[in-house]
Image: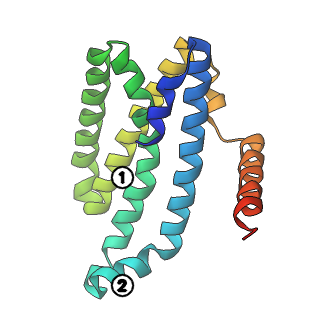
Amino acid sequence: DAFKDVIYCKASKNEMGRGIVKICKNAMMVSILICFLYFIFGNWIIRLLYGDMYDEAYGISLVLVLGHLGMIFYKIIHPYYVSEGKQKWIVTVLITAIVINGMGNCILIPKMGMLGAGIASGISYVFCSIIFVIMVSKEFRINYRDFLINKNDLNDIIICMRRLVDVYGRH
């Protein structure tokens, strides 16, 4: 949620589109890092905080942590459409995502239990974000592939990290 507030500082519509893409990509990279850390340390953290009784929670929580990646684009893009007065469109997309989640729950919970519920939620999150990416791509004439993390984005992160080391490493 913190990233989305930066979008409204942009002056032109062209800058707005590029800003949305950049913020989505940055949020995705941070979130992927968090997911990776949770994948490595999540089971240990759950045991530390809640005890061995909650070992089963790791699998479902990992699915939900990964599923949240699907919500990143929606969470960043939807405030723009609210500011444009397109609340009805947002509600339509969200209702469709809820229906997808409900159908997924009906199919997956009997077969997979709580893991199926997590997967159904993840699928509905991804659906919601895909729709929002398509809309932004059309409105700002941006290739949807621009939302994908590429080598240049990773190089930008490396440069940023080096600058942080340079600044904070000189105590």
Q: Position of residue 104 (x, y in %)?
A: 29, 44
Q: Residue at x 32, y 55 (%)?
A: 118
Question: Left or right of 83: which side holds 165?
Answer: right
Structural distance between the alpha carbons of marks 1 and 2: 26 Å
The residue lying toward the viewer, choosing from 48 and 104, is: 48
- Front residue of 157/33: it is 157
Whether residue 43 is situated above or below residue 95 in the rendered picture: below
Q: Residue at x 26, y 16 (%)?
A: 88
Label 1 CA crowd tier, 10 Å (few <14, some 14–19, many 20+): many
Nearest the viewer among 79 and 46 is 79
In the picture as drawn, the residue positioned furthest to the bottom comes out as: 52
What kind of element bears circle 1?
helix
Q: How is the image coloured?
A: rainbow
Work out whether 149 lies above or below 91.
below
Determine the image quadrant of residue 32: bottom right
Q: Which image quadrant: the C terminus? A: bottom right
Q: Residue at x 55, y 45 (%)?
A: 28
**What percent of the width, then of the height, locates residue 81?**
38, 19
Circle 1/circle 2 CB separation < 8 Å: no
Relative to 45, residue 71 above or below? above
**Residue under numbered circle 2:** 48
Q: Which residue is mark 1?
A: 119
Task: Report the quarter where the N terminus lies.
Answer: top left
> As shown in the figure, which amino acid type bears the numbered disc 2?
Leu
Between disc 1 and disc 2, the foreground one is 2
**Which amino acid is tagged 1?**
Ile
| Residue 27 visible to an observer of this rendering | yes
* Circle count: 2
Q: Position of residue 61 (x, y in %)?
A: 35, 64
Image coordinates for residue 56, horizontal then vertical, percent: 31, 75
